[in-house]
Image (cartoon, rainbow, N blue to C red):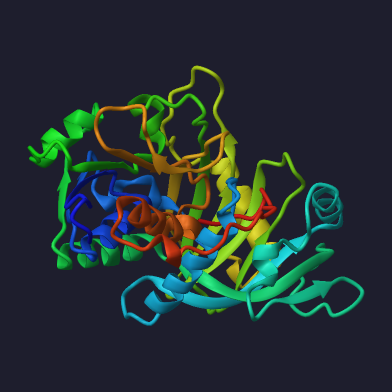
């Protein structure tokens, strides 16, 4: 850390982005306090599926940030109780979905083919792992994340590095966040990881969330994941994520009408029924399994690109790290490391070169 580098940071938000950013800074000997209205297990991050793979997100550094995150999650998967598993599985398209996506972008996308275990699957050729009704796909091994367990792991790691977590306090302004943290130093940096809260806090009118719904069932012995890519514009898709004794099944993208409050509604029984029917058609072992719980959460989608940058328009020192859409897990470490470089505690020379990356909006992840 150079003499001009700030030594204190206030991170707003205790979801996946806030905790990961807090870990990066605290482990670089920065004095960090995370301020959040909600505990980590109460955030929308805790309600995610989740798998590694870009979804509902754009930026010319998505490939690089995703790759950095993959490497970190791969290392963390070796820690017992982290909630991270490296699992094999299938990504698939119906024929209509494949043709629609192929007309828009590269299929398979660059980020998928860069995974060493990547293998294509085609109907009429090698059909291993392609369920009935699917036309094209690939098989590879990626991180599958039990979010409640992983957020607990990050919280312990953050505190072990000397970080302080302050919950139960709503942040109404960036100056107010510094006051809540108890920092009198005007040079303490504020890092905005508030997700949907950025709509009012910044304010940023480009935030436009979608609602997702998941069903958690007892695992009947499934060891591989499955996720599909519906035709663009379809609001329901299928993913099956085994996480030890449970399987997390989804999903949907429920849109908000103008003026609707951004709240996670109660689970919709009709959506639950369709989620289970689609999953059972792909994995018959799931028929009749015990439903343990349901989750409904909001994805912090930004109609503009992910925002990870200094905000030079303000008198205080402010870094933004929000707008990760459905790729919060996928971009978490890459974006947090970028914050560390902006902060000055990590070397800019360590940053991978930018890679333009087409992303599939239908890949359920993060």
Note whether 149 is above or below 171 in the view shown: below
Q: Position of residue 112 (x, y in %)?
A: 67, 67
Note whether 93 is above or below 80 in the view shown: above
Q: Residue at x 24, y 27 (%)?
A: 173
Q: Is residue 50 toward the left or the right of residue 21 in the image?
A: right
Q: Residue at x 47, y 73 (%)?
A: 71
Q: Residue at x 70, y 71 (%)?
A: 113
Q: Is residue 200 toward the left or the right of residue 118 in the image?
A: left
Q: Position of residue 203 (x, y in %)?
A: 39, 24
> Looking at the image, which residue sits at the far front?
3
In this view of the protein, which residue sits in the foreground, 329 or 26? 26
In this view of the protein, which residue sits in the foreground, 184 or 209? 184
> Looking at the image, which residue sits at the far right?
124
Q: Quadrant of residue 23?
A: bottom left
Q: Is residue 91 toward the left or the right of residue 222 in the image?
A: right
Please indicate, yes or no, whether residue 131 appears anywhere in the rendered image.
no
């Amino acid at each position: 850390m150079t003499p001009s580098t700030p030594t204190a940071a206030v991170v707003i938000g205790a979801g996946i982005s806030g905790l990961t950013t807090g870990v990066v800074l605290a482990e670089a000997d920065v004095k960090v306090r995370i301020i959040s209205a909600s505990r980590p297990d109460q955030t929308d991050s805790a309600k995610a599926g989740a798998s590694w793979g870009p979804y509902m997100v754009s930026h010319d550094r998505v490939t690089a940030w995703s790759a950095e995150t993959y490497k970190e999650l791969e290392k963390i998967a070796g820690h017992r109780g982290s909630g991270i598993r490296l699992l094999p599985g299938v990504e698939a398209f119906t024929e209509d979905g494949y043709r629609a996506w192929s007309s828009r972008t590269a299929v398979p996308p660059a980020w998928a083919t860069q995974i060493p275990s990547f293998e294509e699957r085609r109907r009429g050729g090698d059909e291993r792992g392609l369920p009935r009704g699917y036309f094209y796909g690939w098989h590879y091994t990626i991180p599958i994340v039990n979010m409640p367990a992983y957020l607990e792991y990050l919280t312990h790691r953050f505190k072990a590095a000397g970080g302080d977590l302050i919950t139960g306090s709503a942040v109404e302004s960036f100056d107010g966040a510094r006051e809540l943290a108890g920092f009198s130093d005007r040079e303490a940096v504020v890092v905005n990881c508030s997700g949907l809260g950025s709509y009012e806090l910044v304010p940023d009118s480009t935030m436009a969330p979608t609602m997702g719904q998941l069903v958690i069932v007892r695992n009947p012995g499934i060891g591989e994941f499955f996720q599909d890519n519906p035709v663009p514009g379809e609001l329901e898709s299928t993913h099956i994520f085994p996480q030890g004794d449970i399987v997390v099944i989804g999903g949907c993208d429920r849109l908000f009408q103008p003026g609707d409050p951004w709240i996670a509604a109660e689970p919709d029984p009709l959506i639950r029924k369709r989620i289970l029917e689609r999953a059972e058609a792909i994995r018959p072992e799931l028929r009749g399994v015990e439903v343990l719980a349901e989750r409904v959460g909001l994805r912090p989608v930004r109609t503009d690109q992910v925002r990870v940058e200094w905000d030079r328009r303000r008198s205080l020192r402010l870094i933004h790290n929000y707008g990760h859409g459905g790729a919060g897990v996928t971009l978490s470490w890459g974006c947090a490391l970028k914050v560390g470089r902006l902060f000055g505690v990590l070397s800019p020379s360590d940053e991978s070169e930018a890679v333009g990356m087409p992303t599939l909006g239908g890949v359920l992840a993060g």
